Amino acid sequence: MSHTAFLRNGTVVGCTLLVIALGAGLVACGGDGDPAAKPYDAADDIAFNAPVGDGKQVDPDKPLEITASGSDARITDVTATDSRGRYVAGELSADGSRWHSTSPLAAGTHYTVQVSTEDEDGNPGRKTLEFDTGTPKTSKVLNVTFGPDSGTYGVGQPVTATLSQPVKDRAQRAIVERALRVDSVPAVEGSWYWVDDKTLHYRPKDYWPVHATVTAYSNLAGVKIAERLWGGDTKPVKLTTGDSVIAVTDSGSHRMTVYKNGQVIKQIPITTGKPGYETRNGVKVILNKSYVVRMRGTTIGISAGSSDSYDLNVYWAARVTWSGEYVHAAPWSVGSQGYANVSHGCTGMSTSYAQWFYNTVRQGDIVQVVNSGGKQMEPFGNGFGDWNVDWEKWQKGSALTPDTSNPAMTARLSPESV
């Protein structure tokens, strides 16, 4: 199906009211952008067929059908768009006698359908239909909230989408995912990953480019997802990335190396988790920064009377996990920094280095821990461990990735226009 732009201000040649299974209020008009080439009048040859719901609005649950009823006319092209600029996919029969939609109509939406025709002598004709779809009653609305808030972030910041209703069925997930768009300039390869029934994360194959613009938006409004479940409006977000800042924490050598756009800009003596409290290995993303954080051993399971117990204010703290792992100032362990691991899991450094680090990094920058005896960073649930999932496995977390073990499911997930 070719997509021909609809010119709302084009010259109107004729207008005929069609009442063919659509109901009053659906108007078909003839028009041509070139005043010198008046098309033949195809009003008697074209029928727009779609069931009408309450209030004489088209039922979005039913397909749209356009037929050439006259023996001397054929349809050559159909372009159907809604008020949001979304195209309706469709199929045209080989003989040009019938076109029908293959993607669902959205609920509560205004549509414009432009039909190009020709008669037996090859003379062109053009008709335009405008109609509104109804909104099903007793239906739930699936709203989407994108994260983080619009702003500037590091190159490791994933985009998140939180759904207001759980979606478990894979085919229904495909409908949702197909409508959630992430565009970046410059363009990069990326994919959504279903963390659970209500949460998706989006990341590129590699880190975002520096100084990129990333826009997340939804085309889900009015789209039917399941019986009595329709997509709602969603506020888009726009992110920009700063310089690439990656801090590599080597627990074995007790040193952090900070890279900016691939170049080493600082090496810092550090201490990480001691035996029994080893720092997690893997890639982490800075979640937020706080000038001062109260840290207590009881929050990580250390009893108040233990020799390991602590309760103190910590300064220049950059958080990397929700369970309480930070990069922060640790003036009490300066003698061990660069030589031994003595912390309860955080990365500690001198106050001056911590202040420098705090002022250098932003939310979304990368902290990668290597050579620790600790467990691997969790992919989800304790911050953004997304980058610890290899790209092949990440792609399998998308509902649009074909399930090669189930050909029927693969066919159901074939892309459609939304």
Image (cartoon, grey):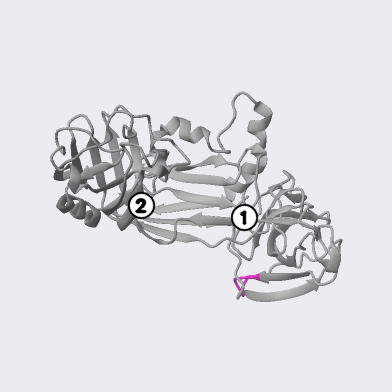
Q: Is residue 106 left or right of residue 50?
A: left
| Left or right placement of residue 168 versus residue 388 in this view | right
* Magenta span includes 273: no
Q: Is residue 19 visible in this depiction of the protein? A: no
Give the prevailing secondary structure in the magenta stretch.
loop
Q: CA distance from mark 1 to mark 2?
A: 25 Å
Please identify the residue farthest to the front as the structure is shown. 305
Q: Secondary structure at mark 2?
A: loop
Between 284 and 293, the one lying in front of the other is: 293
Q: Is residue 265 left or right of residue 100?
A: left
Q: Residue at x 38, y 31 (%)?
A: 376
Q: Is residue 43 above or below residue 141?
A: below
Q: Which residue is mark 2?
A: 186
Mark 1 neighbour density, 10 Å: few (under 14) some (14–19) many (20 or more)? many
Looking at the image, residue 27 lies above or below residue 71: below
Badge number at residue 220: 1
Q: Look at the image and say whether residue 34 sits in the magenta stretch.
A: yes
